[in-house]
C-alpha cells in the first residue's frame, strides 16, 4: 500500500459505486476518490479502528499465550507497512481481516482465539 496524504477529488469527478450501510446494500452513491493514488474513499457506517485498538488486542494475546517480543514487533511493523489504520480506504471488516491474516502469519496462536479477542 502507498503512504498517501489522500487529496479528495472534486464533486464533479465522484464515481457511482455500491453503498453499504450497517451491513446491507443501499444502492448506488457517489464516492470520492484520492486524486493522488486513485483509492476510493470508504463511506460505510463501520468506521475503521485506530492502530491502538489492535495494539490492545496484541496485549491481550500476550497475556494469554506465549508470544515473543520479536513476533509482536514484526507484526506491528507489518501492520504499519500495510497501513492498517488508513481510514480513507478501509472499513472495519477489511481491517479485521487484514489483522487476522497478519496475526496468523506472525503469531503461534490459533486463529479462532485471535478472532474472539478481536470481537471483544
Image (tube, grey):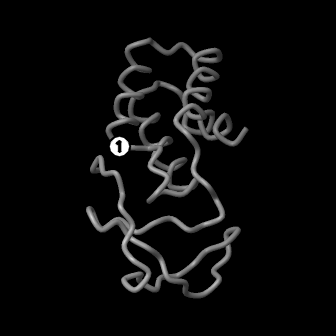
Q: In this view, does 98 lie to the left or right of 2?
A: right
Residue 33, compared with residue 16, is above or below; it is: above
**How far across and down, in percent of the image, does residue 57 sit?**
61, 29
Q: In the image shown, does 78 or 8 lie closer to the viewer?
A: 8
Q: In the image shown, does 99 or 17 lie closer to the viewer?
A: 17
Residue 81 occupies which quadrant of the picture? top left
Residue 49, compared with residue 64, is above or below; it is: below
Q: Is residue 30 left or right of residue 33?
A: right
For label 1, the residue is 82
**How far across and down, in percent of the image, does residue 74 sit?**
35, 24
What residue sits 49% from the left and 52% below the top?
87
What residue sits 57% from the left and 51% below the top?
48
Residue 9, compared with residue 59, is above or below; it is: below
Q: In the image shown, does 16 or 22 lie closer to the viewer?
A: 16
Residue 55 occupies which quadrant of the picture? top right
**How far across and down, in percent of the image, does residue 54 sit?**
56, 34
Q: Is mark 1 on a helix, strand or loop?
A: loop
The number of discs equals: 1
**How far across and down, in percent of the image, does residue 23 sit?**
67, 69
Q: How crowded is mark 1: few (under 14 residues within 10 Å), some or many (20 or more)?
A: some
Residue 35, compared with residue 94, is above or below; it is: below
Q: In this view, does 3 lie to the left or right of 104?
A: left
Residue 20 occupies which quadrant of the picture? bottom right
What residue sits 26% from the left and 63% below the top?
36
Amino acid at each position: 500500500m502507498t503512504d498517501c496524504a489522500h487529496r479528495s477529488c472534486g464533486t464533479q469527478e465522484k464515481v457511482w459505486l455500491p453503498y453499504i450501510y450497517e451491513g446491507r446494500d443501499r444502492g448506488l452513491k457517489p464516492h470520492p476518490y484520492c486524486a493522488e493514488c486513485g483509492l476510493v474513499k470508504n463511506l460505510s457506517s463501520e468506521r475503521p479502528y485506530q492502530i491502538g485498538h489492535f495494539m490492545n488486542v496484541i496485549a491481550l494475546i500476550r497475556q494469554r499465550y506465549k508470544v515473543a517480543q520479536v513476533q509482536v514487533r514484526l507484526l506491528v511493523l507489518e501492520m504499519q507497512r500495510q497501513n492498517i489504520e488508513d481510514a480513507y480506504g478501509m472499513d472495519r471488516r477489511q481491517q479485521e481481516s487484514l489483522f487476522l491474516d497478519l496475526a496468523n502469519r506472525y503469531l503461534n496462536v490459533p486463529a479462532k482465539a485471535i478472532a474472539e479477542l478481536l470481537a471483544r
